[in-house]
C-alpha cells in the first residue's frame, strides 16, 4: 500500500520538529482548549491535551502571548497530578506575576522597536516566563505592583504591541480571571494565606470567609489560624448586616468607600458590631454569603433569608437547609428542602440522588424510583448520578415498590396486571360493538385504597415489570462496582425470584462474581443452588449410544450450571454437606455415577464432622462434632436430623450407583451397613429410640436382606 505521508515528512525525527507558524501554534492551543472543555475530567483527557501545549512550548521561537498561553494550559494539567501540582502552581504564579506587573507598570523604553526581538532572550532566542531578581530596576515607579516571585527583567517581557498581536485568536483569559484561578490553585495545595491575599485584592468576600473559617478549624489557640472562624463571622456580618443599634431604614455607614482606605483591616472587625437589620439593598452575592454564614452558625433562618433574597432561585440555600435538617434527623423537612432545591436546579444529579435517598427512607418507593432515574439521566460521568450507589438504590426502590404492590393484592392474584391490561384495551370489542367496560369500573374502585398499584398502573408498569427493571438496575450497579459482592448478591436474589421462570443466566453470573470476590463457601445460598439444579434436571438428558457421562451443549443453560458447580463451587467446598448432596444429584443426572458416589460420601463426611477431603471413610466415621461449632449432631436435634438425611442419601447412592462403579461394585451393601452402623454406634447414647433412630434401624433391616 502506498504511503500518503508527504516526502518532506517521512524522515522527520520526533525530537527534531520544524518551527511552526504562530497561526499553527494557535490552532494547537485551540484544539487543546476544546478537548479540555468538552471531555471528561480524567487522566486520559490530560494525556490527550498535554502534547499540544508541550509542542508549542518546545518550539524554538514563538510569540510571547502564545508562549504564555501554552504555559497556562500546561499548568492547568499539572495541577491535576499529585507529582506535578507544586510545579504547576509556581508556574502559574510566574505567569500571573508577569501579566499583572507588566500590564500595570508603565511601558518600558528599554526594549527594541521590533516586538519579536523584545519577546526573546538574548541567550537562547526563546521567550522566558521565569523571572530573576533585580532590585534596582524600575524602583522609581510609584505604587508599582509587586510579584510573588522575583521581578522579570525588561528583556524577558514583551511590548504591548506583541501581546496584542494575536489577542483575538488566542482568547486569553483576563487578568482577574488568571488571578482567581491562581488563588484556587493555592488552596488546592493548602496555602490559604497566599490564596487569601489574592481574594482580598479581588474582593471575593465569600472565598475570604471560607479561607478564614478553614484556618479556624486548625484548633491552634495561639497559631496563625487562631480565631479564623470568628473573623469569618465578623466579615460576613459586616458585608450583610448594618451596625448594631441601627434601624432598618438607616443608611449603611461603612460601605464600599471604606475599602479604599489603605489602613482598613477587616480582620479587626467584631461580630458583635454587626447584628443590625439586613442591609438594604443586599450586597452582591448576598445569598451565598448568607449560606456560608449559616454553615458556620448552623442557623436555618439564614438559609431561609438567602432563599427569599434570591427570589427562590438559589438552590444552594435549600440544599444547605436540607443538610442541616438531616443532621437533626428531620427527614420530612430535609425532603421538602431538597425538593425545592431540585425544582430550581433540575439537572443536578446530586440533588436528585438526595431526594431519592430521603424518599426511600420515608417509604415512598415510587417517588424514590423516579428521583433515582432522574439522577441517572442527568449524570454526565461515573462520579455523578451514574454510579453504582445510585443504580443500586434504584434497584432497591423498584424492588420495594414491587413488594408493596404484591402486598396490596395478597390473595388477589392478577389484579396488579389487570389495570395495565384494561388501560391498553380499545373502546370496542373485536366484533365492533361498543362496550361500557364494567370490569374496568370495578378495578378502578379496587385501586382507591391501593396507591402503589395505582401509581404503577398510571405509569404502565405491572408488578412483574417492576421486578425486571429492579434486576436491570442491580446488574448495572454491579457492572460499575465489580468488586461489591453485595450488589451481585442482590442480582442473584432477584434473578432467582423472577416469575414465571427465573433468569438462570443472571443467577449463574451473579454467583460466579460473588465467589470471585469472597472466595468462600459461606457465600453460597443452598436455596438458590437448589433452584438451579431443579431448572437443569427437569429435563431428562438424551440417551447416548455409549451411555457415558452426559455433557450439555456448549452455551446451553445446563452447560453453564454444570460449569458453575464443577469449576467454581467444588474447589471451595469443605464443610457444606447439603451442597455436596446437590452436586451428587447433578452428577447422577449426567450419568457420572462415580462422581455422584464420591460427592455423596463427601456430603456424609461433612455432616458427621469429617472435613478432610482426602480422609478415608473409616476415619470420617470416628469424627465427633466439636462442641464449639454451630451444631454438634450428638446433642443438637437439627444437626442430628441432617446427619440421618445424609446417611439415607449415602445408602441410596450405594444402592443406585454402587454396582455401576468399579470402586464399589458388589461391595455396596457392606459399605452402606458400615456407614449406618458407625452413626448408630455414636448416637446410641443420645438418640436411641427417637424417630430418626428408627429410620436408621429401618435402613439396617433393609441392608440385611
Image (cartoon, rainbow, N blue to C red):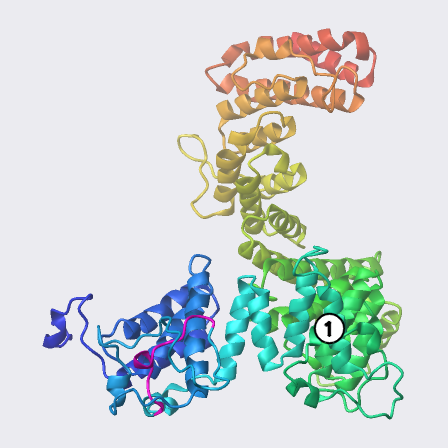
Quarter of the picture containing the N terminus is: bottom left
Q: Position of residue 276 (x, y in %)?
A: 86, 82
Quadrant of the image occupied by residue 216: bottom right
Q: Residues within 10 Å of mark 1 (few under 14, many from 20)?
A: few
Magenta span: helix, strand or loop, mainly?
loop
Quick check: 112 above or below 560?
Answer: below
Q: Position of residue 337 (x, y in %)?
A: 79, 73
Disc 1 element: helix
Quick check: 611 above or below 565?
Answer: above
Looking at the image, which residue is at 24% across and 90% down? 114
Q: Is residue 671 visible?
A: no
Viewer-proximal residue, 45 or 564? 45
Looking at the image, which residue is at 57% across and 54% down? 478
Quadrant of the image occupied by residue 74: bottom left
Quadrant of the image occupied by residue 213: bottom right
Q: How many marks?
A: 1
Q: Position of residue 266 (x, y in %)?
A: 70, 76
Looking at the image, which residue is at 10% across and 75% down? 7
Quarter of the picture containing the C terminus is: top right
Q: Which residue is mark 1?
A: 268
Viewer-proximal residue, 395 or 172? 172
Q: Which residues are magenta?
A: 148-160
Q: Is residue 78 left or right of residue 467?
A: left
149 is within the stretch colored magenta: yes
Q: Is residue 166 visible?
A: yes
Q: Is residue 615 left or right of residue 471?
A: left
Looking at the image, which residue is at 40% across and 30% down? 546
Viewer-proximal residue, 335 or 48? 48
367 is within the stretch colored magenta: no
Q: Is residue 225 left or right of residue 190?
A: right
Quick check: 383 above or below 616?
Answer: below
Q: Position of residue 494 (x, y in %)?
A: 66, 52
Amino acid at each position: 500500500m502506498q504511503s500518503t505521508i508527504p516526502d518532506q515528512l517521512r524522515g522527520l525525527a520526533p525530537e527534531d520538529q520544524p518551527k511552526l507558524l504562530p497561526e499553527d501554534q494557535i490552532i494547537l492551543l485551540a484544539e487543546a482548549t476544546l478537548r479540555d472543555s468538552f471531555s471528561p475530567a480524567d487522566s486520559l483527557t490530560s494525556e490527550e491535551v498535554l502534547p499540544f501545549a508541550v509542542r508549542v512550548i518546545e518550539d524554538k521561537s514563538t510569540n510571547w502571548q502564545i508562549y504564555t498561553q501554552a504555559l497556562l494550559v500546561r499548568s492547568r494539567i499539572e495541577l491535576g497530578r499529585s507529582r506535578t501540582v507544586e510545579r504547576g502552581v509556581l508556574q502559574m504564579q510566574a505567569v500571573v506575576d508577569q501579566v499583572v506587573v507588566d500590564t500595570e507598570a508603565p511601558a518600558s523604553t528599554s526594549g527594541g522597536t521590533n516586538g519579536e526581538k523584545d519577546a526573546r532572550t538574548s541567550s537562547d532566542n526563546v521567550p522566558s516566563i521565569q523571572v530573576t531578581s533585580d532590585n534596582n530596576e524600575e524602583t522609581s515607579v510609584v505604587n508599582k505592583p509587586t510579584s510573588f516571585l522575583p521581578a522579570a527583567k525588561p528583556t524577558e517581557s514583551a511590548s504591548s504591541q506583541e501581546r496584542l498581536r494575536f489577542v483575538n485568536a488566542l482568547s486569553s483569559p483576563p487578568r482577574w480571571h488568571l488571578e482567581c484561578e491562581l488563588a484556587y490553585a493555592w488552596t488546592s495545595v493548602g496555602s490559604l494565606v497566599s490564596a487569601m491575599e489574592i481574594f482580598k485584592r479581588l474582593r471575593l468576600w465569600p472565598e475570604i470567609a471560607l479561607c478564614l473559617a478553614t484556618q479556624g478549624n486548625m484548633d491552634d489557640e495561639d497559631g496563625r489560624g487562631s480565631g479564623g472562624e470568628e473573623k469569618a463571622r465578623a466579615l460576613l456580618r459586616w458585608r450583610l448586616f448594618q451596625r448594631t443599634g441601627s434601624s432598618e431604614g438607616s443608611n449603611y455607614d461603612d460601605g464600599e468607600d471604606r475599602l479604599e482606605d489603605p489602613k482598613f483591616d477587616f480582620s479587626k472587625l467584631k461580630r458583635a458590631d454587626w447584628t443590625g437589620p439586613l442591609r438594604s439593598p443586599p450586597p452582591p452575592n448576598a445569598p451565598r454569603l448568607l449560606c456560608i454564614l449559616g454553615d458556620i452558625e448552623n442557623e436555618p433562618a439564614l438559609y431561609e433569608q438567602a432563599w427569599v433574597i434570591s427570589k427562590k432561585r438559589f438552590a444552594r440555600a435549600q440544599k444547605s437547609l436540607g443538610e442541616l435538617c438531616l443532621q437533626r434527623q428531620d427527614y420530612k423537612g430535609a425532603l421538602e428542602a431538597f425538593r425545592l432545591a431540585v425544582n430550581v436546579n433540575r439537572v443536578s444529579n446530586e440533588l436528585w440522588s438526595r431526594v431519592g435517598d430521603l424518599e426511600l427512607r420515608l417509604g415512598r418507593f415510587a417517588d424514590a424510583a423516579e428521583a433515582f432515574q432522574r439522577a441517572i439521566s442527568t449524570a454526565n460521568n461515573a462520579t455523578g448520578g451514574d454510579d453504582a450507589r445510585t443504580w443500586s438504590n434504584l434497584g432497591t426502590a423498584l424492588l420495594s415498590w414491587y413488594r408493596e404492590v404484591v402486598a396490596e393484592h395478597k390473595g388477589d392474584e392478577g389484579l396488579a396486571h389487570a389495570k395495565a391490561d384494561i388501560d391498553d384495551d380499545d373502546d370496542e370489542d373485536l366484533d365492533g360493538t361498543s362496550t361500557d367496560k364494567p370490569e374496568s369500573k370495578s378495578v378502578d374502585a379496587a385501586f382507591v385504597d391501593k396507591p402503589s398499584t395505582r401509581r404503577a398502573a398510571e405509569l404502565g408498569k405491572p408488578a412483574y415489570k417492576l421486578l425486571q427493571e429492579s434486576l436491570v438496575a442491580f446488574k448495572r450497579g454491579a457492572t460499575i462496582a465489580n468488586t461489591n459482592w453485595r450488589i451481585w448478591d442482590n442480582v442473584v436474589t432477584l434473578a432467582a425470584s423472577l416469575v414465571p421462570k427465573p433468569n438462570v443466566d443472571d443467577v449463574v453470573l451473579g454467583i460466579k462474581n460473588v465467589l470471585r470476590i469472597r472466595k468462600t463457601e459461606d457465600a453460597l445460598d443452598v436455596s438458590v443452588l437448589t433452584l438451579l439444579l431443579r431448572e437443569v434436571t427437569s429435563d431428562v438428558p438424551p440417551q447416548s449410544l455409549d451411555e457415558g457421562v452426559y455433557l450439555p451443549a456448549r452455551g446451553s443453560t445446563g452447560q453453564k450450571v454444570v460449569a458453575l458447580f464443577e469449576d467454581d463451587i467444588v474447589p471451595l467446598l469443605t464443610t457444606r454437606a447439603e451442597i455436596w448432596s446437590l452436586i451428587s444429584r447433578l452428577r447422577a443426572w449426567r450419568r457420572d455415577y462415580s462422581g455422584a458416589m464420591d460427592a455423596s460420601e463427601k456430603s456424609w463426611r461433612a455432616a458427621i464432622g469429617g472435613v478432610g477431603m482426602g480422609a478415608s471413610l473409616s476415619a470420617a466415621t470416628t469424627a465427633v462434632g466439636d462442641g464449639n461449632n454451630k451444631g454438634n449432631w450428638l446433642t443438637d436435634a437439627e444437626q442430628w436430623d441432617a446427619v440421618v438425611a445424609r446417611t439415607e442419601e449415602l445408602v441410596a447412592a450405594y444402592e443406585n450407583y454402587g454396582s455401576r462403579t468399579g470402586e464399589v461394585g458388589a461391595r455396596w451393601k457392606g459399605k452402606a451397613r458400615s456407614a449406618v452402623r458407625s452413626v448408630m454406634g455414636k448416637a446410641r447414647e443420645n438418640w436411641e429410640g427417637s424417630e430418626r433412630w428408627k429410620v436408621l434401624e429401618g435402613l439396617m433391616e433393609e441392608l440385611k436382606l
